[in-house]
Image: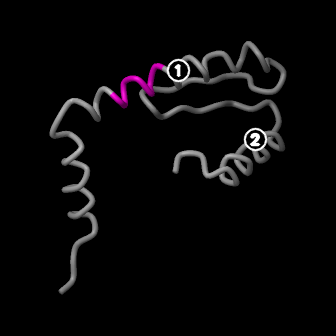
Amino acid sequence: MRCNQAFVTIVEALIYWETDTFSHSIQRKEVLLAAALGAIPEQYLQQITQVGGFKLIYRAVFAALELCHAVVKAVFERAVGY
């Protein structure tokens, strides 16, 4: 019997929303992320020219493409977000 993975994923995701715990967790992480990433331009004005975003989706504008590649590589090597 085949199972639709998207359907299973949606059902599992909805289980997290049965209570407010998941929503509150996301809101707390959003505040922490905004504070941490908001301080980046002040610390590294020469390397990162702009940081911005919404909820848990953010972007950074790097002055040099090489630095951008290095950051992306480091993030994936450390499995950030998993």
Instruction: Give how far across and how far down residue 15 sits, in percent.
Output: 19, 48
Using the image, tell me which numbered label, if any, was put on residue 19: none
Q: Quadrant of residue 49?
A: top right
Magenta residues span 25-31
Residue 66, above or below 8 = above
Answer left or right for 53 relative to 12: right
The kind of residue tagged 2 is: Cys
Judging by the rendered image, the residue that carries numbered circle 2 is 68
Which image quadrant for residue 50? top right
Q: Name the residue under label 1.
A: 34
Residue found farthest to the bottom:
1
x and y, in percent, of residue 46 in the image? 84, 21
Q: Pick whichever, 18 or 55, lies toward us.
A: 18
Report crowding for label 1: few under 14, some 14 to 19, many 20 or more residues within 10 A (C-alpha): some
Picture coordinates of residue 22, whole percent (x, y): 29, 35
Q: What residue type is labelled 1?
A: Ala
Residue in view at x 46 percent, y 19 percent: 31
Q: Which residue is drawn at 53% across and 46% down?
A: 81
Colour scheme in use: one colour
Q: Distance between the residues labelled 2 and 1?
A: 20 Å
In the image, what residue occupies the spot 36% across and 24% down?
Answer: 27
Could you tell me which secondary element the residue under label 1 belongs to?
helix
The secondary structure making up most of the magenta span is: helix
The N terminus sits in image quarter? bottom left
* Label 2 CA crowd tier, 10 Å (few <14, some 14–19, many 20+): some
Query: Which residue is rendered at x = 44% and y = 25% of the image?
Result: 30
Q: Nearer the viewer, mark 2 or mark 1?
A: 1
Residue 12 is a magenta residue: no
